[in-house]
Amino acid sequence: MTQALVHEETTEILQLGRSKHARGLWSDAWRRLRKNKAAVVGLIYIGFMILVALFAPWLAPHHPNRIPSDAFSNTPPFWDDGGTWTYPLGTDSLARDYLSRLIYGARISMIVGVIPIVIVVLIGVSYGLISGWLGGRWDNILMRLVDVVYAFPSLLLFIIFQAAFRESWLGRSLGGLTLLFVAFAITGWNGLARLTRGQTMSLRQKEFVIAAQAVGNPSPRIVYRHILPNTLAPIIVAVSFAIPGYILAEASLSFLGIGIRPPTASWGSMVFQSFPIVTFRPIFVIMPSVLIALIMIAFAFVGDGLRDALDPQSNR
């Protein structure tokens, strides 16, 4: 009876102390993040692009894949000679409205930036927690697998996957997005696994973990309730810096013609399709390229702001 009371009281103290620390850390981090003007601008731009992606059917003046009978291919934007307000940013080589395709292209970049990173976090964080907590021989075996995966060049593996399975049911699913998600997940989890493993090995020697073990908490509960919350700060920063890499990878693969399957609109495929006319209509290459650059810069600003905000030594 006495042991049970001690167990209950110790667990409550641990949880109370951890929750107060967590509230203080996250509230202080949010305060610091709001002071970082570049990060705030990045958040606002990302939020704006998410809204554009969500409301694309209502914002786009035309269907992105419709070829109208009253339009000509490569119509210039409205400010050039021959332009028209019916197609404000002109039309592509198939006479499709360029503005509508740019708006719908935001959907692909947002999806590619969010869904693969969710899969990568689930695999990498779980793997790192298990490896770091077990330690010893199991940790050595698990990390050798990480080294093997890390040895493969990511972009080259993406290209091989796209070339090998592009015409399969996996490559046709969701316009090629499913194959992209699989390719990103296979090579993208190792960095987060290493980061989480290092954090776990450091935290398992802390007093609150030792106390949780002493009162008889099972290992899964200790890992989930005590170690995982304390590893979230570096994981969030790593995720914010990883998202632009996936957006750029999708754009690069689409530029090479092995990314999103046509006629789905994506910014990378629009650069690829407009590249043959870059000499006399460079604006068609510049517009999607600028949008790719802006969304990557926005995520980089947010990542830099989170790194400073979640650093306990920061005085900003």
Image: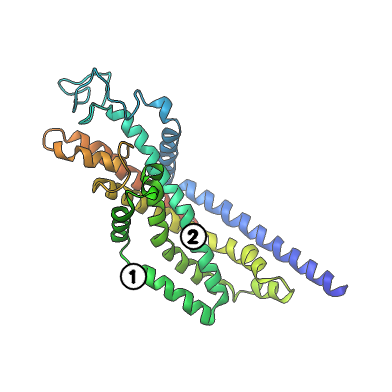
Q: How many marks?
A: 2
Name the secondary structure under disc 1.
helix
Front residue (pair 105, 206): 105
Q: Considering only vertical position in the picture, is 134 above or below 70?
A: below
Q: Residues within 10 Å of mark 2 (few under 14, many from 20)?
A: some
**Quadrant position of residue 19:** bottom right
Whether residue 116 is visible to the viewer of this picture, yes or no, is: yes
Which residue is labeled 2 in the image?
235
Mark 2 vs 1, N-terminal side = 1
Name the secondary structure under disc 2.
Answer: helix
Outermost residue on the bottom side: it is 137
Q: Which residue is mark 1?
A: 151
Q: CA distance from mark 2 to mark 1?
A: 22 Å
Which amino acid lies under the numbered mark 1 shown in the image of this protein?
Answer: Ala
Relative to 248, 202 lies left or right = right
Q: Amino acid at mark 2?
A: Ile
Q: Is residue 22 above or below residue 252?
A: below
